[in-house]
Amino acid sequence: MAVRTLSHVDVYAGYPEKKVTLYMLMLGFFALLLGTFFGPLQALNYGGIDAYPLLKPLVQSYYQGLTLHGVLNAIIFTQLFAQALLVYLPARELRMRPNMTLAWISWWMAFIGLGIAAIPLLGNAATVLYTFYPPLKGHWAFYVGAAIFVLSSYVSIYLVLDLWRRWKRANPGKITPLVTYLSLTHWLMWFLASLGLVVEVAVFLIPWSLGLIEGVDPLLSRTLFWYTGHPIVYFWLLPAYVVAYTILPKVAGGKLISDPLARLAFLLFLLFSVPVGFHHQFADPGISSGWKFFHTVLTLMVAVPSLMTAFTLAASLENAGRARGGKGLLGWIRALPWGNPVFLGPTLGLISFIPGGAGGFVNASFPLNQVIHNTTWIVGHFHLQVATMVTMSAMGAAFFLIPHLTRKPLVGIGYARASQWLWFIGMNLMGFALHWMGYLGVPRRAHISEVASQYQGAAPFMALNAISGVILFVAAGFFFYVIFATALQNRRLPEAQTPEIPFTEVVSGPEGNRVAQLTDRVGFWFAVAVILIVVAYGLPLIQMFTSLNPVPGMRLW
Ligand code: HAS
Ligand code: HEM
Ligand code: CU
């Protein structure tokens, strides 16, 4: 393979958007690196082993580590991955350049916001966990930094809207190309979804942490948080779905079965992602069970697009396996490219998403939730969802994106492969153990290694948890080695050999398809989504805003 050294200027001259995308992506993976570091320590904690005394004085407590883990992984990494992927892919698909000034502004806002929030987090002045429920009160810099960070995503929303509008103007009457449509609905959903968090932080938490107001209402804050906190999980998930729909079938050697079904799935996410947040508040007093039930029904609605996705993708993978010569009922599975790490990440993620999604139905059902709420069951659920499905899709994407953006060939393909298998095995073992421990009543968010003898009934699963923590530590080491060694090497391929983005072809396209045409009326559907939110949240929020019970802040650490 011809490899030579080129200066940075040469590489990005024709494609300035590649550079900003690379910066977004690598900042995100850097956050994941720091955040993931605490994961194995938490897994050891749930195996009865307390490693935290070793971290003093750098990390003061289990809860400081847990806050860093949740914030860096679930808030910072996920958003940066969306900002990298779902601005770049539509720009590539439309062959258009996003507004570069704004693109850099979004990166700087994310970077500065992260920097400001990091100071109190690292200094143990905002050990409030990633849900920052009042009356826990962190340092104002945490809320201000987080706000700047989240607002940087609004710039990304604008960038994609702007690309789409420019394209529509130049192509009147044509249907939006698939990747752009999926990205657009994702960003519009996030705009509606983020409003709760923005109001919570800007109107209540920042003034409160600055001492401008005396107290805040915990119930209203929790409600505003979960208004965003549920749909945020789809904000994390949909970039992974974009990889699964528009890249994975091609990588697997086949085609996406149906373009209109992919559009319909994303449209359903736009409609139903937001008005379901009460399923995180079944145990909260002050919300009537009628409203909680209504949100349960809508939660089951928002599972529909994932069920659709399962069938569309399974059929697309079967199409690929058969195209590669796989025969018989299951022979197509063996024929898939299991040696390709770009295939492994999203596919192993999807497989893990099946038990994770099934657990979601348990969580969403009113009576069963009473059994598993606030136990490690929930931790098991979302590690299969966000820490496996979403994270592994991002890892798989990194294996083709970094070489595409930098023209640097992937380093250590064997490590890349091993990282994906080990991550998959580790997360599924841990997910299994955590679900079971939760069923036995082991609480989440508990420094239980201090009192491990209390949970002897769960001992075998606790041991499994510690083992999976070690496996995941090795998996993470391999993964970060591969991506940073790839990005930091100084070998580059010549321009003619730039690896292309593997956009997939489709078996059934949008042309002349009634469903696809209907889904393209984005403004109309956005309005329907707003109406659904007003119906599901309007009255309860009016009640909460008109009967505030503010309480002063507390610092428990
Ligand atoms: Fe959840 C709690 C319900 C999806 C994340 N969830 C959480 C928390 C997080 C989270 C972080 O109703 C904890 C928050 C906290 O700290 O307190 N969740 C659901 C439901 C779904 C769901 C019904 N969650 C997600 C996703 C997440 C996520 C996605 C992140 C990305 N969740 C809940 C509830 C709670 C909750 C309650 C509150 C519990 C409590 O009491 O606190 C659904 O959207 C899931 C639908 C998924 C499916 C699976 C479809 C399968 C697919 C794969 C197909 C595979 C193929 C591969 C094609 C129906 C698409 C084939 C391959 C071959 C080789 C053949
Ligand atoms: C919490 C382990 C990676 C997101 C936890 C907990 C454990 C754990 C045991 C429960 C702590 C408790 O409830 O006290 C691990 C391991 C990882 C890993 C071993 C891999 C090496 C990830 C990734 C993400 C993630 C990649 C997201 C992208 C979260 C979140 C929490 C959590 C949001 C909840 C924090 C809270 O309750 O405040 N993790 N994790 N984890 N993890 Fe992970
Ligand atoms: Cu939820």
Image (tube, rainbow, N blue to C red):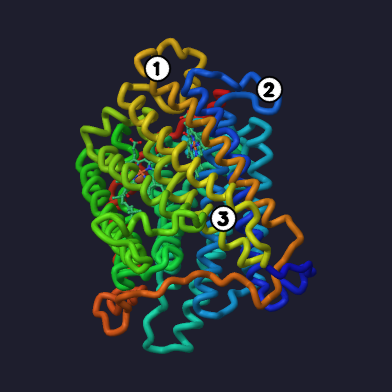
- Identified by mark 2, the residue type is Lys
Q: Is residue 118 above or below residue 411?
A: above
In whole angstroms, how far apart are the C-alphas of marks 1 and 3? 38 Å
- Identified by mark 1, the residue type is Ala
Which residue is label 3 attached to? 80
- Mark 1 Cα within 10 Å, few/some/many (few <14, many 20+)? some
- Residue 304, percent across and down? 25, 56
Would residue 406 appear left or right of 322 to someone viewing this image? right
Which residue is label 2 attached to? 56
- Residue 84, percent across and down? 57, 61
Q: Which labelled disc corresponds to residue 459?
A: 1
Between discs 2 and 1, the one toward the N terminus:
2
In whole angstroms, how far apart are the C-alphas of marks 3 and 2? 30 Å
Between discs 1 and 3, the one toward the N terminus:
3
Q: Is residue 432 above or below residue 264?
A: above
- Mark 3 Cα within 10 Å, few/some/many (few <14, many 20+)? many
Between discs 3 and 2, the one toward the N terminus:
2
Along the line of sight, the residue nearer the viewer: 517 or 278: 517
Secondary element type, mark 2? loop
Quarter-of-image position of residue 121: top right
Q: Are marks 2 and 1 in contact (CB under 8 Å)?
A: no
Q: Quadrant of the C terminus?
A: top right
- Identified by mark 3, the residue type is Leu
Q: Residue at x 45, y 53 (%)?
A: 236
Along the line of sight, the residue nearer the viewer: 50 or 236: 50
Residue 212 visible in the picture: no
- Mark 2 Cα within 10 Å, few/some/many (few <14, many 20+)? few
Quarter-of-image position of residue 360: top left
Depth check, mark 2 against mark 1: the one in front is: 1
Q: Which labelled disc corresponds to residue 203?
A: none
